[in-house]
Image: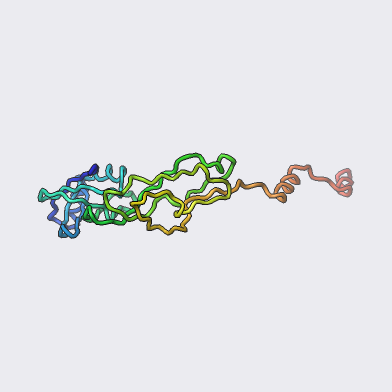
Amino acid sequence: MALSLKAEARKDTTKFDIKQLRVKGKVPAVVYGKKVAATVITVDQKELVALLRKSPHAVIELELPDGGKQPVMINEIQRNPLNRELLHVDFHQINMDEPVKTVVTLEFIGDAVGAKEGGILQIQLHELEIRCLPSEIPASITVDISNVGIGENMLVSELNVPGTIEVKSDPSELVLTILAPQKEAPEDVAAQGKEDKPSEVSEEAKEEQTV
């Protein structure tokens, strides 16, 4: 298992104690599962942030305070809505021989032919919900968009996903589309021409100006 994290025991649970833990660079957390009774712990903030940046949905080998190690996945993250500071994390202990539900990032590669022709590429889906064994969870799923033309869409059902992975997202969900380039409407062009053309002065106005 490539990702690992060390947990420390946490006994004090008052608001003041938790605040002090965060000041010391620790994130309050809890771990639970079939083989692990719900246990309050702390993890290092810098290590957790680095792990989240690398692969937030990966399986983690969590070293527990009693010295044992268990495979876990992050079930929930609480953040400060203002500064996005990590406030609390839930770790769910998993069994490596049982399928789990998670999400993986979609990695788009290639230059869409439609975009080359002036179309507007709009990506609607960035993550895919899947179910598979923990050892089968990919770092990402590659999506080749090279052959997508103007006016064409790509749906979840069209993604190339390994056979060991069950897709849980709606098959009809839109992944991306390429819109036709917007053309200026004829009435807009005509209106612009009128604005650019010098205004004509009536004969009566000319006579008034000469009086």
In this rendering, would 200 be left or right of 28?
right
In the picture as drawn, the residue positioned furthest to the left comes out as 66
Q: Residue 27, image x and y in percent?
A: 22, 49
> What is the quadrant of residue 5 in the picture?
top left
37 to 146, vertically: above or below: below
Q: Residue at x 47, y 58 (%)?
A: 172
Q: Residue at x 45, y 41 (%)?
A: 109
In this rendering, would 14 be left or right of 165?
left
In this rendering, would 66 be left or right of 75?
left
Q: Residue at x 89, y 46 (%)?
A: 207
In the picture as drawn, the residue positioned furthest to the front comes out as 163
168 to 63, vertically: above or below: below
Q: Residue 97, image x and y in percent?
A: 23, 54
> In this view of the protein, which residue sits in the foreground, 25 or 100?
100
Q: Residue 32, image x and y in percent?
A: 19, 58
> In this view of the protein, which residue sits in the foreground, 68 or 135?
135
